[in-house]
Image (tube, rainbow, N blue to C red):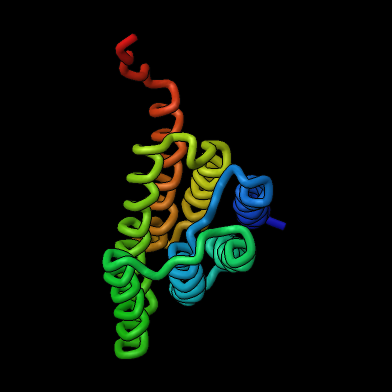
Amino acid sequence: MAISATLGLIAGSVHLSAYALYLRQVLRGTSRPNTATWTLWTFLAALNAASYLAMCRDLAKAATPIAGALACAAVLTVSFWKGRLTRLAVFDRGILAIGLSAAAVWWATRSATWANLLLQGAFVLSNVPTYRGVWRRPDSEQPLPWFGFGLAYALNIVVVALRWRGELADLAYPVLSLVTDAGVGATVLWRQRAPRPATDP
């Protein structure tokens, strides 16, 4: 097996391992997943995995998004048991509309590339509530799973580079996901270590 294919499998495994860490936190009660958010992410992840695989036609490159889609479904299942049952907020509905638009674009144009690129915008926006949450309450998330996601995306970028075919679109998903997900971990660490304002005696 080529080293790039092996790295693809490793990237997918790292992604699954990061999700396993997150699920462990959920089961221990240190994280409380929002069912509405994870329903949205599961839909986006499934559509992303399908469109990315159709776009690149390379299982080694697509191992990470496929692993992510499966793991999102697992977190969603657990969130109905341990999480908070909530409805989609107005902001989330807007992101869902982008995801549905991506599916419509794919169906209408038969272009998995345009659909996948549109989905990346939805993924970036879908992380905004997470950033808001960890900014206000740094203890609401643990950084390790988010850095694990980032490592998987970094390995995915290496796989794309090793199996390069001149398509910049192949880089959009792993690069944007690396920045946004690892950014959550960095924000958590920064906020947890930031000096807190002194209180009056």
Residue at the (42%, 41%) spot, across then down = 184
Residue 44 shows in the view: yes
On the image, the x and y values in percent for residue 138 come to: 43, 35
Residue at the (34%, 73%) spot, across then down = 96
- Count of all numbered marks drawn on residues in the image: 0
The answer to which image quadrant residue 80 occupies is bottom right
- Residue found farthest to the bottom: 108
Q: From what the image shows, is residue 7 above or below residue 50?
A: above
Which quarter of the rendering shows the C terminus? top left
> In the image shown, does 178 or 138 lie closer to the viewer?
138
Residue at the (50%, 69%) spot, across then down = 42
Q: From what the image shows, is residue 115 above or below residue 175?
A: below
> In the image shown, does 101 or 93 lie closer to the viewer?
93
- Say left or right for 145 vs 191: right
- Residue found farthest to the front: 201
- Residue found farthest to the top: 201
On the image, the x and y values in percent for residue 182 come to: 45, 41
On the image, the x and y values in percent for residue 69 come to: 56, 67
On the image, the x and y values in percent for residue 165 come to: 43, 62
Residue 3 shows in the view: no
Residue at the (27%, 68%) spot, across then down = 90
Which quarter of the rendering shows the N terminus? bottom right
